Image (cartoon, rainbow, N blue to C red):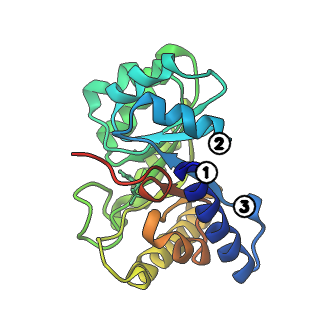
Amino acid sequence: MNDLLENLAEVEARIQSACTLSGRNRDEVTLVAVSKKHPVERLREAYDAGLRLFGENRVQEAMAKMPELPSSIEWHLIGHLQTNKVKPVVFSEFTLIHSVDSEKLLMALENESAEQGRVQPILLQVNVSGEGSKFGLEPGILLPLLEKAMQCHHLDIQGLMTMPPLAEDPEKAAPHFAKLRDLRNEAARASGFPLPFLSMGMSHDLQVAIREGATHVRVGTDIFGARKG
Ligand SMILES: *Cc1c(COP(=O)(O)O)cnc(C)c1O
């Protein structure tokens, strides 16, 4: 077995065990293989290992990789998106954008999707801790933003995403994941958007995230190995 197959088997076993421990079905959790900064050859290996969903954090890098790889791959954008990059994004093949973190970006995506005559699936990125990630909506503006989003007929808001502050102990992320879940429950009740997806958990804290309700875990290092640069 090559290292990628081994890594993937290990990650899969951790996902499975976390699902079992919390009484969830494996198919409730989607593994997004975070391929940023890895070359196309490495992604092809991952494809050969059976992976069909890749997450990239930069539009340009993702769009350079897409034509080199089979079209059966699904791509998610997980990184910060500048409003002036919206045009290529909506043109491209991202089936889910995890990182919508401002009203300005929300409106830019709505306008561009409307122009293209399509509906773009998105998640709203929330900064639940007030620290850690420099990106993300303040929890307090989520509800007013969802109210405005009622007018956005070319966006499909499927849920929330978060990046907790880095901590060595994965359990330290638990309260942040729980807060995102509670916020989702509250926002879904108040807004009428079902918001089924919770994108939370990365290589070192994916089990904690699954226990707290993650539907999407974004795993890079533990599948592909350390990133250069
Ligand atoms: C890089 C990245 C990940 C993956 O992190 P790993 O620790 O390598 O698993 C997940 N989410 C986002 C938003 C990222 O930028």
Neighbour tally class for label 2: few under 14, some 14-19, many 20 plus, Cα within 10 Å? some
Instruction: Answer with mark 1 or mark 3, whichever residue precedes in sequence.
Output: 1
Type of the residue with mark 1 = Leu
> What is the CA distance from the residue labelled 2 to the residue labelled 3?
21 Å
Instruction: Give the residue pinned by disc 1.
Output: 5
Q: Residue at x 42, y 45 (%)?
A: 78
Q: Which residue is mark 2?
A: 49
Which residue is painted at 26% across and 34% down in the image?
Answer: 82
Q: Nearer the viewer, residue 135 or 17?
A: 17
Instruction: Give SS at disc 1.
Output: helix
> SS of the residue at dot 2?
loop
Residue 125 vs residue 115, the one in the foreground: 125
Q: Is residue 161 above or below residue 152?
A: below
* Side (left or right) of 129 relative to 23: left
The image shows residue 95 at horizontal and vertical percentages of 57, 34
| Quadrant occupied by the C terminus | top left
Q: Position of residue 166 (x, y in %)?
A: 29, 71
Q: Earlier in the sequence, mark 2 or mark 3?
A: 3
Asked if labels 2 and 1 touch by Cβ distance under 8 angstroms, the answer is: yes
**Above-or-below relation of 103 to 184:** above
Q: Residues within 10 Å of mark 1 (few under 14, many from 20)?
A: some
Q: Quadrant of residue 62?
A: top left
Does 131 appear above or below 199?
A: below
Which is nearer the N-term, disc 1 or disc 2? Answer: 1
Which disc is residue 28 wearing?
3
Amino acid type at circle 2 is Ala
- Residue 137 in the image: state x and y as whole percent: 32, 57
Q: Secondary structure at mark 3?
A: helix
Q: Quadrant of ligand 1?
A: bottom left
Q: What residue is rendered at 57% in x and 48% in y?
A: 2
Mark 3: which amino acid? Glu
**Residue 88 vs residue 68, the one in the foreground:** 68
